[in-house]
Amino acid sequence: MEKKVRVRFAPSPTGGLHLGGVRTALFNYLFAKKHNGTFILRVEDTDQTRFVEGAEEYIVSCLAWCGIHPDESPQAGGPFAPYRQSERKSSYRQYAEQLIADGFAYYAFDTPEELDAKRKEIPNFLYGQASRMDMNNSLTLSSAEVDELLKNNTPHVVRIKMPEDEHVSFVDMIRGLVSFDTNLVDDKVLLKADGMPTYHLAVVADDRAMEISHIFRGEEWLPSAPIHVLLWKYLGWEDEMPQWAHLPLILKPDGNGKLSKRDGDRLGFPVYAQNWLDPKSGDLTKGFKELGFMPEAFVNLLGMLGWNDGTDQEIFTLPELIEKFSVERISKAGAKFDFEKAKWYNHEWIKNADASQLLEVVKQEFATQGTTLNDDAYTLKVIDLVKDRCNLLTDFILQSGFFFTAPVEYDLTAVKGKWTTEKTAFFNRYQSDLAEGLTAAEMEENFKALATANALKPGELMLPFRMMLVGGKFGPGIFDIALTLGIAETKKRIAAALAAFDA
C-alpha cells in the first residue's frame, strides 16, 4: 500500500520568519495538498538559549496571512501531539542510550573550557575520528570511570560516532543521488548537557514518530543529511526513512550568496514575511505585509522562486499552485531574489483584484494616516479608478488621497509662468457650466469646446485642471476624477485653486 503523504514545516522560534522559511513551508504545503496529504507545523524549540518569546505566535501569524493552514500543529493539535519538541523532551534520551548501547554513539564529558583550549590549540578543530581518542569520553575512559561520572551527574553530552572510510548516499528528489564521505563529518552532539536533544536527534525521532513521508528543507541542511541518514539506519528505522528534497537557496539579487536580513537592510527591501519586533533588542524589522504586499502576491512570488510549471505563466493563485506543483520542476540552482519583480507580482495582483477585495485593507491604510473612510460605495469607486497605478497597497494613500481630502497646496511652478486672465475666465465659465448628470466624456467634450471657443489650447488647460483637483501631476484621467468627486466638489476645488493661482 502506498505511504500516505505527511510533510512538516519545522521552524525554530528564534526570531522573524525569513522569506526562505515561508517558501519551505509553502513547498511542503503544496506537495501535501497536491497528494491529498497532511501538512504539519512542528516547533523545534530544543535550543532554549536562542528561544525568543512570541516567535512561535509570529510564525503561526505569518503562515495564516499567507493562507497556509497546518492540519496538525501546537495550536490545532493532532494525533501525534505534542508538536513542540520541548514538550517531547522525555522521549529522546531512550534513543541516545540505544545508540550508545549499540556502539553508534558515546558519552562525552569534556568541559566547555577543555573544548575551548582544543580550539585554540588546533585551528578548525573538529571533534571526530581524528580527535575523539584524545578527549574525555566513554571511548577513552574505563567503564567504571564512566559509570562513576554518570552516577555523580557529571555534565555530559552524547555524540554520534561517525564511521571511518564510508560513504553515505541517498536519492534526493531534486538533486538525484548525493553522497558524503564520512571522514569529513564530525561527531555531532545528539543530546545536550541539559537533556535536550539537538536538531539531529530530535528531527529523526520526531519524523519517525509523526510518520513523516517526505522532507522538504533548505539546501543549507545538506551537510547534515549523512548524520540523519545514519541515525535512521542505526536506530533500525531505515525502511521507514522519508524521501528527501533539499530546496535551492534564495540568493542575493547579484547571485552571490544566500539572501540575508542584512542584505535586505542594505538594499532597502524586507526579507521577513511580517514586521518582527525583537523583544530582546527592541529592533523592528519590516515585513512584506506591512510594506504593502497582498498575501496572494507574496505566495505567488515565493512559489516562482526556484520552481515553474514549464510554461510562461507567472500569475498563480494558491489553488493553481497546488494543481500545477511538481517536484520535477524545482530547480537545483539557487534563485536570485529580485525586488522589482516582487513588486511587479504585487502590482498584477492589486490591478486584477476586485475593489471589494481591497476595501478593508485600503481603509486600514488610510486609518494609519488618521483618515477614516466611511462611505464604502464611494471608496470602491476610487479603488477601481486607481488600483492599476499601485505597486503596493500603501500606494493607495498617494494615488487616491485627494479623493478624500482636497489639496491645500499646489505645484504652482508648473502653472504660474503660463497663467493668464483668459485662463482664469475659462475656468470660471467651465465650472459654472458643470451640471449634474454629465458623464466623464461629456465633461471632456465641453471642456475642449469651450477652450476652442476662447482661442485656448485644451492641452495647456489640462495640467492646471489636474492641479486644481489633485494638487500635483499624478492620478487617473482628470475627467474620471471630476466625475468621481462629483460636480459640487469639483466646482469647489476649481474656485479654491483659482484664488491661489490668481494670488
Image (cartoon, rainbow, N blue to C red):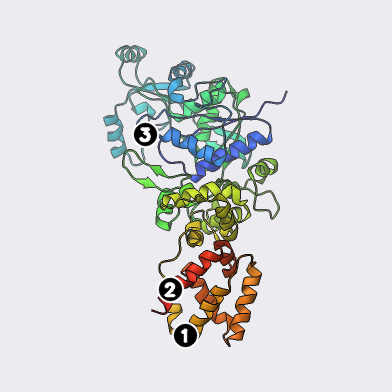
The residue drawn where x is 50% and y is 45% is: 19
Rendered image: mark on residue 129: none
Residue 463 in the image: state x and y as whole percent.
Answer: 52, 76
Indicate left or right for 363 with 114 as reference: right
Calculate the distance from the C-alpha at mark 3 to the C-alpha at mark 1.
Answer: 72 Å
The quadrant holding residue 141 is: top left
Tag 2 secondary structure: loop
Residue 195 in the image: state x and y as whole percent.
Answer: 38, 21
Q: Which residue is mark 2?
A: 411
Tag 3 secondary structure: loop
Type of the residue with mark 3:
Arg
In the displayed structure, 423 sits above or below 107; it is: below
Indicate left or right for 442 with 389 as reference: right
Q: Which residue is mark 1?
A: 421
Q: Quadrant of the C terminus?
A: bottom left
Rendered image: mark on residue 50: 3
In the displayed structure, 343 sits above or below 113; it is: below
Q: 414 or 295: which is nearer to us?
A: 414
Calculate the distance from the C-alpha at mark 1 to the C-alpha at mark 2.
Answer: 19 Å
Residue 157 in the image: state x and y as whole percent.
Answer: 37, 23
